[in-house]
Amino acid sequence: MKAENITIKLFLLRQEIGTISKDSTNPFFRSKYFDINTLIKQLNPYLNKHKILLIQPIVNNEVVTLLQCIEDNSFKTSSLELSKNLDAQKKGSEITYFRRYTLGSLLGLEAVDDDGNLASKPSLPNLIIGTPLFKNAQKGLQEGKSIQDIKKIYTVSTEVQNELLNFKLNK
């Protein structure tokens, strides 16, 4: 049987994968994403079935995702250049992020664009001390809502948050 090249193998693999489940939550942006380790774990059976090797080295300050057919050595790559002058923790986060995105992009994984959806959402109204909205927020706190609940509805500055916390402590 003739070895299929990587393009055909990726096409067949894509037909089988469907949508990859997002299993992790970014609390800062309140968005879902797929963890790189979980993503690879979900993809491994498909990669193994189609005899495709996944490698993600860092080459010349770029995170490279390489999918290589082990039968004929054909391959596809995707890469992103790393930022310069980041501390080790930020660099590690960036590497993980780029590994996830280059792999997802290379495979054309079906996923909701959480970052894009968040960017296109209208901004929340500013909560200003002394306004009817502020009094509504205070009422919500009296009824058992948390500051986090308030932040889901309004944009809350540090000053307003401190005022709400003082209100909650004094009630």
Image: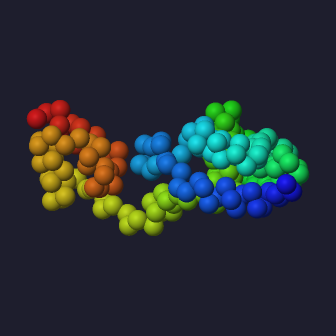
Number of numbered discs visible in the structure rendering: 0
In front here: 99 or 94? 99
- Quadrant containing the C terminus is top left
At which x and y percent is residue 154? 29, 55
In front here: 39 or 17? 17
| 158 over 132 or under it: above or below | above
Image position of 165 (left or right of 144) = right
Image position of 102 (left or right of 67) = left
Q: Quadrant of residue 78?
A: bottom right
At which x and y percent is residue 75? 83, 54
At which x and y percent is residue 98? 67, 48
Point 30% across, 43% down: residue: 148
Q: Quadrant of residue 133?
A: bottom left
The answer, for residue 33, to whether it is visible in the render is: no
Point 15% across, 47% down: residue: 140
At which x and y percent is residue 131? 18, 59
Point 28% across, 55% down: residue: 153
Q: Residue furthest front?
A: 1
Q: Quadrant of residue 76?
A: bottom right
